[in-house]
């Protein structure tokens, strides 16, 4: 394999995504609309919520192809680097590819520059990637991520939302994306408090995904029978940390018990 070389005035520098495009490794968008028989798997609901020590990111595990469940255990929340994470909603294949390229971009920048890219810079870089994906999005392969991280300079968690054109919007408290975003976002909005601690905000994110799954067929809720739990991660001064499945099972059992007590006291049905 021959490595590409560049003249000094044409050096791509720390922009790994730009390097990939320049050497012709970026995939070409489809020439036309996809056939209904070739519907790719789509990831659905993800949320991000700020709390006292940082930010929590959460995503359900279901991917759908039209009205079919194509995957029950897909992961939609990934570490971007030690102090940031990205959650994906939309066409699963391009979304995972975008996350992989984003991770490489941040690692490449750190190696070339000898320092971490600022959280603002990371958010801007992901915005450019989403914008460059617009031709594919117009063919039905849209990717709409959430980005969040712990800002080491400000000492606080921050989160960003995007649209398919690459528009980047910083949210103050919480954000959601995907087909179940309305239901999940409503639960978070009603339960959000700025002083929430880690356990409280993990419970809130779990409750949001559970409620979204109850209303949106494309969102998968916690599946105790199969041992499938949402991916929930905290990002704080201690870095990116995924919540373990054992803790998820314990917290979900507590939420179920609280729901039974509420329904028993009020005589109402439904979920919490």
Image (tube, rainbow, N blue to C red):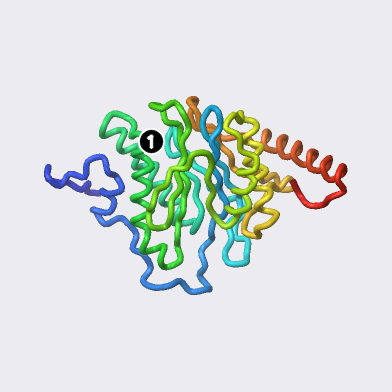
Picture layout, residue 33 above or below residue 182: below
Q: Residue at x 84, y 50 (%)?
A: 268
Q: Residue at x 31, y 33 (%)?
A: 110
Between residue 97 and residue 208, name the one nearer to us.
Answer: 208
Q: Which residue is mark 1?
A: 119
Q: Residue at x 58, y 39 (%)?
A: 232
Residue 171 image position (x, y, % from top left): 47, 42
Residue 36 image position (x, y, % from top left): 52, 73
Between residue 45 and residue 120, name the one nearer to us.
Answer: 120
Q: Residue at x 69, y 47 (%)?
A: 222
- Residue 138 sits in quarter: bottom left
Left or right: 263 in relation to 11: right
Mark 1 crowdedness (10 Å alpha carbons): few <14, some 14-19, many ≥20: many
Count of labels in the image: 1
Mark 1 falls on what kind of element? helix
Left or right: 231 in relation to 32: right
Picture layout, residue 211 above or below residue 142: above
Residue 13 image position (x, y, % from top left): 22, 41
Between residue 161 and residue 26, name the one nearer to us.
Answer: 161
Residue 152 image position (x, y, % from top left): 41, 27
């Amino acid at each position: 394999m021959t490595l590409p070389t560049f003249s000094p005035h044409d050096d791509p520098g720390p922009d790994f995504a730009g390097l990939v495009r320049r050497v012709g490794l970026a995939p070409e968008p489809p020439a036309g609309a996809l056939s209904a028989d070739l519907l790719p798997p789509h990831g659905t609901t993800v949320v991000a919520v700020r709390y006292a020590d940082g930010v929590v990111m959460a995503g359900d595990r279901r991917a759908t192809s039209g009205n079919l469940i194509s995957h029950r255990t897909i992961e939609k929340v990934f570490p971007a680097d030690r102090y940031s994470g990205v959650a994906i909603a939309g066409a699963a294949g391009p979304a995972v590819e975008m996350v992989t390229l984003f991770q490489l971009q941040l690692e490449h920048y750190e190696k070339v520059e000898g320092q971490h890219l600022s959280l603002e810079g990371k958010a801007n870089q992901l915005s450019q990637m989403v914008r460059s994906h617009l031709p594919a999005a117009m063919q039905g392969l849209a990717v709409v991520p959430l980005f969040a991280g712990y800002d080491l300079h400000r000492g606080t968690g921050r989160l960003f939302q995007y649209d398919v054109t690459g528009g980047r919007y910083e949210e103050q408290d919480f954000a959601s994306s995907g087909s179940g975003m309305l239901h999940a976002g409503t639960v978070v909005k009603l339960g959000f408090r700025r002083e929430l601690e880690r356990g409280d905000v993990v419970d809130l994110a779990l409750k949001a995904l559970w409620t979204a799954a109850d209303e949106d067929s494309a969102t998968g809720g916690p599946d105790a029978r199969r041992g499938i739990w949402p991916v929930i991660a905290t990002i704080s001064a201690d870095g990116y940390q995924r919540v373990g499945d054992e803790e998820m099972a314990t917290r979900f059992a507590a939420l179920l018990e609280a729901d039974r007590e509420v329904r028993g006291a009020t005589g109402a049905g439904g979920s919490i």
